Image: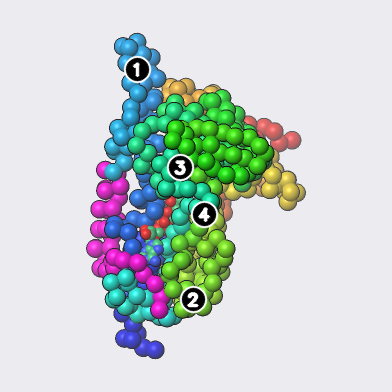
C-alpha cells in the first residue's frame, strides 16, 4: 500500500509516558503521527492517578511532617494535624502544570490528539468512539494498566479502595489495612504511617520487594517496623467484609484484621479489553498484557506495545524509554542504542530506596567474584546537617576489573544519587577508581560514593 493510503505513519493509543515517548520520537524523526486518549486530559495514569499524584502527596506529607517535628515549632506549641484535603491541595496544581506542559509537546510538534476510546477494526484501522476512523501504517499500543479487582471484593463500598481511588480519600483514617506489599502497597504504607495512621501491611509473599538486594529489603523492613507498621508475610485473603464502621480482612490463616479502611494493592491488569484485539488476531495473556519481542513488536510486526500494558517493570521511567525505542524502530533505527534493559528502581518509601544493576544474590548465584563497599549515611556531614542519617550506599564491584556491577541505596535522595553510580557502571572506561580519584562537593550525599569505594577497595587483598 502507498503512504497516501494512510492518514498517519504511526498512530499511538494512550498518552501516558509510553505513548508520549513513542509519538515524540517518531514525530522528531519526520513521521506523520497521531495519538488517541480516552481520558479527558492527556498524561496517562502516570499524571492523573499514579506516579505524579502519589509523589506529590508524599512530598507534601514529608515536608509538612518535617516542619511539625521541628523542635522550634514544638517549642512554640504548634501541634497541627493537616486534613487529607489540605495535604492533597497542591497535587491538582502539579497535575495541571504537567498536563499543560505535555500538551505543548503535542501542539508544538503538530501531533493531533483524538479524544475518545480507540479500538482496532482491522490491522491498519482504528475507530475512535465518536465514529471517526483512522488508518495508519504502524501503531503503538500504550494503554497502560489498572488495579486488578477480584469480583468478590466490593469496591463500591465507601471504605474499600484501590490505588486509583485511594487519593480521593475524604478524611484521614485512623487505621488502614494494605493488602499487597509490592511497590505501590509499601509506598502507601510509608506515606500513611508518616501522617500517624496505624498500618497493617499484608504481604502475600515471604519478604518485602524480593527483587531488591537482601540487605536493602532487611533495612526497609526494619525501618517500617520501627516506625510502627505491622507487616504480615505469607498471608492470602479469604474475603473482605465492608462494615459501616470499618473493613474486616479475613485471611486464609484464620486471622481477621479490622481497620477504618482497606487499600487493595495486589496486582494490575493490562488495559486491553475492548481494544478490538480480536479484529487483528492479537491475544492478551490472563493479566490482559501483550507479549512483545526485544523491539517491542507484538505478533503483528507493525503493531508495537510499550509500558504497563506489556507488564514488568511497570514503571513510568521504563514506559517512556520503551516508547522511544518503539518510535526509533518504526523510523528504521533499531532502538538507537537506548539502554532499555538498564533500568534503575526508585521506591519512594521512607527511607527512599533506589538501585541499579545486579544484586549480591544474583552475583553469588552466577559465581561472579565481587566485593562490596559501603557508606553509612550517619557518617556523612550532609546527612548530619539535614538530619537524614538513616541510610546506606552499597557499591558492588568486580574484584579483578573493579567494574561497577550494582549500586544499592536507601535513605535521603537515594533515587537521585543512584544515577551517579549508573553512569559509572555504564561507562566502558570508568570503574571503582573513579570514585576514589574524583573530588566530590562537600558536604553532599554524593560523597557517599567516595566513602563506599574506599571501604570496598580496602577489602581487597
Ligand atoms: C500509585 C502509583 C504510583 C506509581 N509511582 C511510580 C513512580 O514513582 N515511578 C515510576 O516510574 N512509576 C510509578 N508508577 C507506575 C507508572 O505510573 C506507570 O508505569 C506508567 O504510568 C505507565 O505508563 P503507560 O504509558 O504505560 O500507561 P499510562 O500512564 O497508564 O497511560 C495509559 C493511557 O492510555 C489511555 N487509554 C487506555 N486505553 C485506551 C484506549 N482504548 N483508547 C484511548 N486511550 C486509552 C488511558 O486513559 C491512559 O491515559 C506508579 C503507579 C501507581 C499506580
Q: CA distance from mark 2 to mark 3?
A: 34 Å
The N terminus - image quarter: bottom left
| Residue occupied by mark 1 | 79
Q: CA distance from mark 1 to mark 4?
A: 43 Å
| Residue occupied by mark 3 | 160
Looking at the image, residue 217 lies above or below residue 9: above
- Disc 1 or 3, which lies upstream in sequence? 1
Residue 138 in the image, given as x and y percentages of width and height: 41, 76
For discs 1 and 2, the disc positioned in front in the rendered view:
2
- In the drawing, does residue 10 fall left or right of residue 390? left
Mark 3 burial class by Cα count in 10 Å: few <14, some 14-19, many 20+: many
Q: Nearer the viewer, residue 48 or 380?
A: 48
* Residue 195, quarter of the rendered image: top left
Q: Helix, strand, or loop for circle 1?
A: loop
Q: Label 1 CB, ligand 1: below 8 Å?
A: no
Q: Helix, strand, or loop for circle 4?
A: loop
Are discs 2 and 3 less than 8 Å apart at CB? no
Identify which residue is drawn at 29% across, 38% down: 90
- Disc 3 or 4, which lies upstream in sequence? 4
| Residue occupied by mark 4 | 151
| Residue occupied by mark 2 | 278
Q: Helix, strand, or loop for circle 2?
A: helix
For discs 1 and 4, the disc positioned in front in the rendered view:
4
Amino acid at each position: 500500500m502507498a503512504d497516501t493510503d494512510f492518514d498517519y505513519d504511526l498512530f499511538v493509543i494512550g498518552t501516558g509516558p509510553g505513548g508520549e515517548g513513542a509519538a515524540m520520537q517518531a514525530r522528531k524523526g519526520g513521521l506523520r503521527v497521531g495519538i488517541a486518549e480516552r481520558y479527558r486530559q492527556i498524561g496517562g495514569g502516570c499524571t492523573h492517578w499514579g506516579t505524579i499524584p502519589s509523589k506529590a502527596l508524599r512530598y507534601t506529607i514529608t515536608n509538612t511532617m518535617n516542619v511539625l517535628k521541628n523542635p522550634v515549632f514544638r517549642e512554640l506549641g504548634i501541634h497541627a494535624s493537616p486534613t487529607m484535603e489540605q495535604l492533597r491541595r497542591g497535587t491538582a496544581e502539579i497535575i495541571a502544570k504537567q498536563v499543560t506542559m505535555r500538551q505543548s509537546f503535542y501542539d508544538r510538534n503538530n501531533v493531533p490528539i483524538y479524544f475518545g476510546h480507540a479500538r482496532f477494526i482491522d490491522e491498519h484501522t482504528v475507530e475512535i468512539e465518536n465514529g471517526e476512523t483512522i488508518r495508519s501504517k504502524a501503531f503503538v499500543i500504550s494503554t497502560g494498566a489498572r488495579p486488578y479487582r477480584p469480583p468478590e471484593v466490593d469496591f463500591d463500598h465507601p471504605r474499600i479502595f484501590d490505588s486509583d481511588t485511594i487519593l480521593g480519600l475524604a478524611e484521614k483514617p485512623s487505621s488502614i489495612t494494605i493488602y499487597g506489599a509490592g511497590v505501590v502497597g509499601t509506598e502507601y504504607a510509608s506515606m500513611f504511617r508518616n501522617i500517624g495512621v496505624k498500618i497493617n501491611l499484608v504481604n502475600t509473599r515471604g519478604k518485602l520487594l524480593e527483587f531488591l538486594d537482601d540487605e536493602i529489603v532487611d533495612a526497609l523492613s526494619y525501618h517500617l517496623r520501627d516506625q510502627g507498621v505491622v507487616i504480615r508475610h505469607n498471608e492470602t485473603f479469604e474475603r473482605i467484609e465492608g462494615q459501616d464502621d470499618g473493613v474486616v480482612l479475613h485471611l486464609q490463616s484464620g486471622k481477621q484484621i479490622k481497620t477504618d479502611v482497606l487499600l487493595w494493592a495486589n496486582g494490575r491488569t493490562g488495559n486491553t479489553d475492548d481494544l478490538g484485539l480480536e479484529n487483528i488476531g492479537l491475544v492478551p495473556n490472563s493479566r490482559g498484557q501483550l507479549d512483545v519481542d526485544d523491539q517491542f513488536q507484538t505478533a503483528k510486526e507493525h503493531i508495537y506495545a510499550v509500558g504497563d500494558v506489556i507488564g514488568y517493570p511497570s514503571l513510568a521511567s521504563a514506559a517512556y524509554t520503551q516508547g522511544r525505542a518503539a518510535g526509533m524502530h518504526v523510523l528504521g533505527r533499531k532502538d538507537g542504542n537506548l539502554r532499555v534493559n538498564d533500568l534503575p528502581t526508585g521506591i519512594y518509601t521512607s527511607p527512599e530506596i533506589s538501585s541499579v544493576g545486579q544484586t549480591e544474590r544474583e552475583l553469588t548465584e552466577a559465581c561472579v567474584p565481587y566485593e562490596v563497599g559501603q557508606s553509612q549515611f550517619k557518617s556523612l556531614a550532609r546527612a548530619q546537617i539535614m538530619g537524614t542519617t538513616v541510610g546506606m550506599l552499597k557499591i558492588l564491584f568486580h574484584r579483578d576489573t573493579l567494574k561497577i556491577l550494582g549500586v544499592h541505596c536507601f535513605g535521603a535522595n537515594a533515587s537521585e544519587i543512584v544515577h551517579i553510580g549508573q553512569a559509572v557502571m555504564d561507562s566502558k572506561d570508568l570503574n571503582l577508581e573513579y570514585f576514589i580519584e574524583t573530588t566530590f562537593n562537600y558536604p553532599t550525599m554524593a560523597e557517599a560514593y567516595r566513602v563506599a569505594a574506599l571501604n570496598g577497595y580496602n577489602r581487597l587483598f
